[in-house]
Image: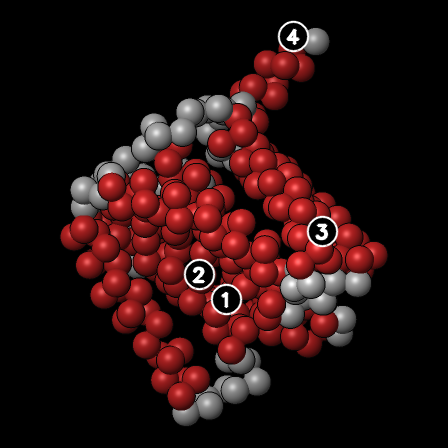
Amino acid sequence: MVNILSFFEQNFGTFAPYTLFNTLIYGIILSLFVFLLLWIFKRQKVKLNDDFFVAVAPWVVFGTTSRALVDASFFPTIWFFVAPGIYFLIFVLFVVAWVFSIFVSRFFKIEWWKPLFVAGFVLTIFNILIIALRAQNLQALLFFSIIFGIACAPFAVAWRFKVFSKIFTKQNLLVVAAHLFDVSATFVALTFFGYVEKHVLPAAIMGLLGPAAFFILKLLVVIPCLMLTDHFIKDKNTKNMLKFVLFVLGFAPGFRDLSRIIMMC
């Protein structure tokens, strides 16, 4: 029993470093979450449309800002506030709020996604205010804005002039922008402020090719994933869920990194 507990503490504990092994396990856990959610949505006949994603958006920001506030020592460094515990915590809070929203919607005769959005928005505003009060490095925000804008410019032009319009749909461009957001925040942190990449694969790639190369490598992974999803996934709910997961995988770590740089933690 002691050996088992030691194994979990070393690989999945509060202070466990990222390794190929636990990164793979986290990926499997994420996949199980996705399939579980798809099953729940199918049973409840929930359509993953724009209303749903508007309702979920503040919960994504709440989760990633909560993680950043752990780094800033505002929230305690406990298992439920770091990966993978924070995924379980946000999932449970989201499900509770979702069930509550359904009851509220029936009682007040409103659409169910609206109270879910409000609940997530209130939680998120609290975190954003704390981050704003602890802001010390607005120069990083300026650097990030410039680099992110430059990275997104070619795709904005492609959207404006309908270049490769079947690939660069509105949904797909949001996913691409989310990953450019992540890379831009990482680039600023590593290049200008002495941060170190902790994830195994990005650290190895950037160690060999430098932080700037990760812009290209991200696009070489994300764009083909979107193309394959569009080509092979016919069920609209499944397609939208997969794209939403791709969006979160880019936006969430990017927003956390940007929040950390701004708070200098």
Q: Nearer the viewer, residue 36 or 90?
A: 90
x, y (%) of residue 185? 32, 53
Secondary structure of the residue carrying tag 4 is helix
Q: CA distance from mark 4 to mark 1?
A: 43 Å
Looking at the image, residue 83 lies above or below residue 168: above
Of the numbered discs 4 and 2, the one sitting upstream in the chain is 4
User: Is 131 situated left or right of 201 in this image?
Assistant: left
Determine the residue positioned at 66% across, 42% down. 96
Q: CA distance from mark 2 to mark 3?
A: 36 Å
Task: Name the residue beneath numbered marker 3.
Answer: 103
Task: Name the residue beneath numbered marker 2.
Answer: 179
Determine the residue positioned at 57% across, 32% down. 85
x, y (%) of residue 72? 32, 33
The mark lying in front, picked from 2 and 3, is: 3
Q: Give amino acid for label 3.
A: Phe
Task: Name the residue beneath numbered marker 1.
Answer: 175
Q: Give amino acid for label 1.
A: Val
> How busy is the neighbourhood of tag 2: few (under 14 within 10 Å), some, or many (20 plus)?
many
> How busy is the neighbourhood of tag 4: few (under 14 within 10 Å), some, or many (20 plus)?
few
The mark lying in front, picked from 4 and 1, is: 1
Q: Give amino acid for label 2.
A: His
Q: Give amino acid for label 4.
A: Val
x, y (%) of residue 20? 55, 37
